[in-house]
Image: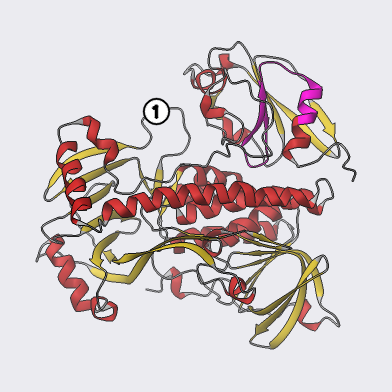
Amino acid sequence: MTRIFETPIYPYVRSADQDAASPARHPVVVVGAGPVGLAAAVDLAQAGTPVVVLDENDKVSWGSRAICFAKRPLEILDRLGCGDPMVDKGVVWNVGKVFFDERQVYEFNLLPEAGHKRPAFINLQQYHFEKYLVDRVRELEAAGKPIEIRGGNKVRSIDQREGHVRLDIETPDGPYAIDADWLVACDGAASPIRSMMGLDFIGRTFEDNFLIADIVMQEGDFPTERWFWFDPPFNRGQSTLLHKQPDNVWRVDFQLGWNIDKEEEKKPENVTRRLKAFLGDDASFELEWVSIYTFQCRRMAKFRHGHVLFAGDSAHQVSPFGARGANSGLQDTDNLVWKLKLVLEGKAPETLLDSYDEERIHGADENILNSSRSTDFITPKSDISRIFRDAVLELSEHHEFARPLVNSGRLSVPCTYDGSSLNGTDDEKMPPRTRPGSPASDAPIGGKWLLDMLGGRFQLVTIDTEAPERIDAGGIGIERLALSSADDPTGALAERYLGGRESAVYLMRPDQHVAARWVGFNEAAVRDALDTAVARDRGWTR
């Protein structure tokens, strides 16, 4: 049987640019056809911004790699038009369990409240994830949207020039060059683009290794939950993580320690020995993919360098506990694309892109902090640290106060851009969860979902109050979405957006984050908040 990751899905095809007398110029070029690069390209094309994706490969990734996709990225994927196939294929889960030695010490629910369209997480192999994004690219191409993906196109060098970037590209037919107004580097943790520019990470590398084993197992006595073991009998002194994936594939992560022979550990007979100790000698399974990773919590000092913008693993890295890698990368592009579109259209100054640095470095630092804490708890580096950790685990079995101290990976949550220069007016008496800078919280409205009603544009959301149907300000149209709390019998809309007030007005950004909020409508305040949200000062002109 031929599997997805063995088949070219965007094979090399000669492009017209290769026969041009001089380098063709494109508004945006994305380098890297992984989850982050493809999401950026889809977002741009949906908004009508022409984009070319370059990738030296012609097929999706091999192995599960990123498998845990959180609620907020699933909501972003809904806006990109491919959330449904991801969730339909993925393994949905909200519950996790923590074990110490052989016994369960407690369990947690990541989405205990109702009134949300999407679950806390799905598990989905990265190759499926990429395939659905490529399918979406093909849909957009068929609909005449300005998007193109070029497999077998390897960027060999870049040169930043006045107002654009020159890229030299290698193909099976030989080299050619193109120009890009803006280059978005989504070319992974080893980022050739970053190396070409002489840039590097700042941060921390942890002295530990984990073995990943993807196994195909028809029978498994495990539910669709996240299970994490500290010091289990089958991996003494270390930890182990288990996730179920689609197609009867199970992901097992074994902590190995620091001083190991990686090639020896990856040999099938040694991986099988570990799996048999875990699953039992009679367990029947097939190895699909094996890899070893080392923890790193690092980022670039800046994500914007002139007309080159870095996103995803090329900009930042975290240890995998907490599923913060791909999830944060999708939030990078969600933050970047609408800003890039407004700059290209001349509706916002280039300084708006400096807020990409500001907001997503804030997100990266938040992820690095939480990921570092998880790694320190999972892999204690001193006797005192291990005694503390084990005491916390013992107490957590019977005492609720100890459970927040257990850190088997604080799982990914969406970033709130507190303190962002783009944040506008805030009525602080409204609910904290929907303050300026925060992602919109979903709620059921008249048989629909609120986030499905928000588009990739600025919108004025009114709840139980009046406002104009549309406001035009500096070339940006703000359409009104009128809601009534009476259309939500569950009370979720009122609880998440009114907080006891009789009415509310929210200015929503194209990435579904709150720009500003008021109790009632004031057009001058809305216009000021829009100028703030797109980094326009009063002297700015188109």
Residue 213 at x, y = what percent? 28, 67
The correct choice, above or below, for 167 with respect to 111 in the image is: below
Task: Inspect this view and state whether residue 81 appears.
Answer: no
Residue placed at 65% from the left, 14% from the top?
464
The answer to whether residue 239 is seen in the rendering is yes
SS at badge 1: loop
Where residue 437 appears, as percent x and y from the top left, is: 60, 36
Q: Is 397 on the left-hand or right-hand side of 526?
A: left
- Against 77, is 23 above or below? below
Amino acid of disc 1: Glu
Q: Nearer the viewer, residue 198 or 149?
A: 198
Q: Specify whether 117 is left or right of 206.
A: right
Residue 319: x %, y % from top left:
39, 58
Q: Is residue 491 magenta?
A: no
The stretch drawn in magenta includes residue 518: yes
Expressed as whole percent of the image width and height from the top left, the position of residue 297 reads 43, 59
Q: Where's the N terminus, which quadrant? A: bottom left
Residue identified by numbered label 1 = 113
Q: Nearer the viewer, residue 18 or 217?
A: 18
**Magenta part of the chain:** 505-528
